[in-house]
Image: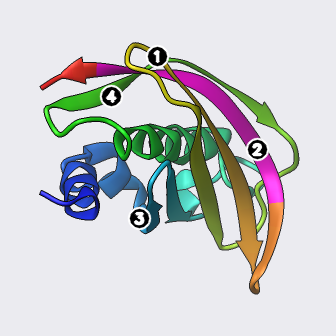
């Protein structure tokens, strides 16, 4: 199965991403972009996108970026990931750009940047960095 088909099939099995209304916008070797609408159900009390939404799509974008670089008989799981919240998540959509910093057979260092998008303008709202672990299917 080709890389894009593999990533999209795996993403389609994610109940959390479906619940959030998230979608994959771009796939390339070592890079994946995921976006999700900022809805009343995914906002916090002041109307901004909730940090949990930023974390969820950032973690998934980073994880799928890692998945693009490993053999078809493996998946990845998050070993650890941290988030720095940089600004309120304003806009209509959040966009996460995940990438692999250092691929490895046992550990993969990844990152994701999350942007609030309003009227085509992006504002950096969160930065994530973590480690993914390849696991056999």
* Residue 5 placement: quadrant: bottom left
Region rendered in magenta: 124-134
- Secondary structure under the numbered disc 1 in the rendered image: loop
Q: In front here: 35 or 33?
A: 33
Tag 2, which secondary structure?
strand
- Please state which of the two labelled residues, at mark 1 or mark 4, is closer to the viewer: 1
User: Which of these two is toward me, 113 or 66?
Assistant: 66
Image marks 3 and 2: residues in contact by CB distance under 8 Å:
no
Q: Is residue 84 left or right of residue 51?
A: right
How far apart are the alpha carbons under marks 3 and 2?
Answer: 18 Å
The residue lying at 40 percent from left, 65 percent from top is 23
Name the quadrant of the C terminus: top left
* Residue pointed to by mark 4: 76
Q: Does the CB distance between marks 1 and 3 fall below 8 Å?
A: no
Residue identifier under label 3: 24
Residue marked by disc 2: 126
The residue at the point 46 percent across, 16 percent down is 107
């Amino acid at each position: 199965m080709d890389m894009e088909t593999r990533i999209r099939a795996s993403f389609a099995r994610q109940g959390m991403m479906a619940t959030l209304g998230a979608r994959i916008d771009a796939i390339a070797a070592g890079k994946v972009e995921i976006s999700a609408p900022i809805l009343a159900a995914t906002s916090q009390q002041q109307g901004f996108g909730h940090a949990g939404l930023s974390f969820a799509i950032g973690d998934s974008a980073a994880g799928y970026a890692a998945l693009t670089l490993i053999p078809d008989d493996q998946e990845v799981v998050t070993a650890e990931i941290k988030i720095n919240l940089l600004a309120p998540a304003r806009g209509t959509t959040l966009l996460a750009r995940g990438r692999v910093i250092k691929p490895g057979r046992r550990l993969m260092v990844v990152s994701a940047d999350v942007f609030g998008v309003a009227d085509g303008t992006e504002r950096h709202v969160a930065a994530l960095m973590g480690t993914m672990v390849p696991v056999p299917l």
